[in-house]
Amino acid sequence: MPYVSVPRVSSPPFSYDQHSGFHIYDRDRHQVYKRHDPELLYALLTYDAEAAKYTKADKLRKNPPKRTDETHHFYNAQLTHYGLSPTKSKQAAKVALLQVYESENNLTVPPHILNLEENLRSQFRAKEAKLLEEAISKRNEEYELEQKQRAKRKRQEDAVVAEIEEAIITSNKKQKTNVKKPLDIHKLAGTYLIVAPQVSEGWDCQGPLQLQLAPSSTAKHLWGTFDFGVFEGKMRSQPLITSTKPSRSINFFWRGRETGEGESTYGPKNTATFEFLPGGIFKGRMYWDCLGEFEIKGKLEAGGSDECDVADWKREYWAINDANYERERVGRWGGWAGDSDEDDDDDDEAESNSDTD
């Protein structure tokens, strides 16, 4: 059942809301005055601070109780609750309440105020029911839209998976008869539509998962930026070395952040391996500490890259390190841990930090 915040209903000077029930609301003082029980009100009216200093045996108490009297506005509100006229002073209000109580041995709420209370309660319940119905309807609409988006994403993912599987079969057939050619990383550059069911379904990601790849200016490394909904980051390939035995697989390290809390994630376990196939398709595996190793596939949607972006990716990649992690942690919980820093030495990942890579 969704929670709804229902505004108070009023018939001045009385109001009704879900927190205080039937009450008098003083707008000038932002104060709520509920009706006091007659016996509790009588005890308040007859409280003797001097007598309270002594026990029933007429001995002085070591720690006599301390009680602060209510305000004039409080006592006037009680007069109104019980159908009596407000007074110009607190003492006059207390006397008026006490006189009625002692003469009738009670304080009685007049029928017209009880009827008003029931009427305001009914108005409030009706408004609450209407808002609740609207909230449920909105939630159902949002759920239906979410289901449609999820089904659309599933169809897109299924289509990409089918295309990738077909490309894998074709590639395997060609590999039996053709000699492998080394990868041209410039042709790998572009934006990929990503399929990773363990991520998209496990965290109910709303939008498509995307990855963008681009080579460094020297083509020694392939850099990337990705947004997988629940986490995002930058990736950097291990040095690309031309070999007499060409491989279509590229290994990456990655550094990023959880999109919820913004906490950074990095280290030697944050790896990915992609095998690039003909037709702008790759398959592989990736590791994330919140999920472990998961399967990932991608299809090139748009080729090309902007070299200026790669420089930004590098800066963001190297800025995620131990020193900045500690500064961010201290920043979240208070304190100071120095200025931000870029990682110039990453022994764990055995990576070289060079702006030319």
Image (cartoon, rainbow, N blue to C red):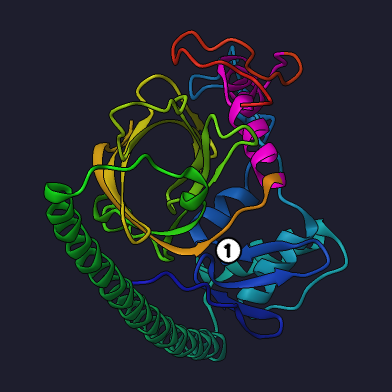
Q: Which quarter shows the N terminus?
A: bottom left
Q: Residues within 10 Å of mark 1 (few under 14, many from 20)?
A: few
Residue 243 lies in what quarter of the image? top left
For the residue marked with disc 1, what is the amino acid? Glu
Q: Nearer the viewer, residue 321 or 280?
A: 280
Image: magenta residue range: 308-337
Q: Residue at x 61, y 25 (%)?
A: 318
Residue 213, percent from left and from top: 51, 47
Residue 13, percent from left and from top: 71, 81
Q: Is residue 181 above or below residue 60?
A: below
Q: Is residue 106 above or below residue 257?
A: below
Residue 106, percent from left and from top: 50, 68
Q: Which quarter shows the C terminus?
A: top right
Please say whether residue 323 is one of the residues in the magenta stretch.
yes
Q: Residue at x 65, y 61 (%)?
A: 98
- Residue under pointer 1: 102
Q: Is residue 236 above or below residue 197?
A: above
Q: Nearer the viewer, residue 246 or 337?
A: 246
> Is 157 positioned to the left or the right of 77 in the image?
left
Q: Secondary structure at mark 1?
A: helix
Q: Residue at x 83, y 66 (%)?
A: 28
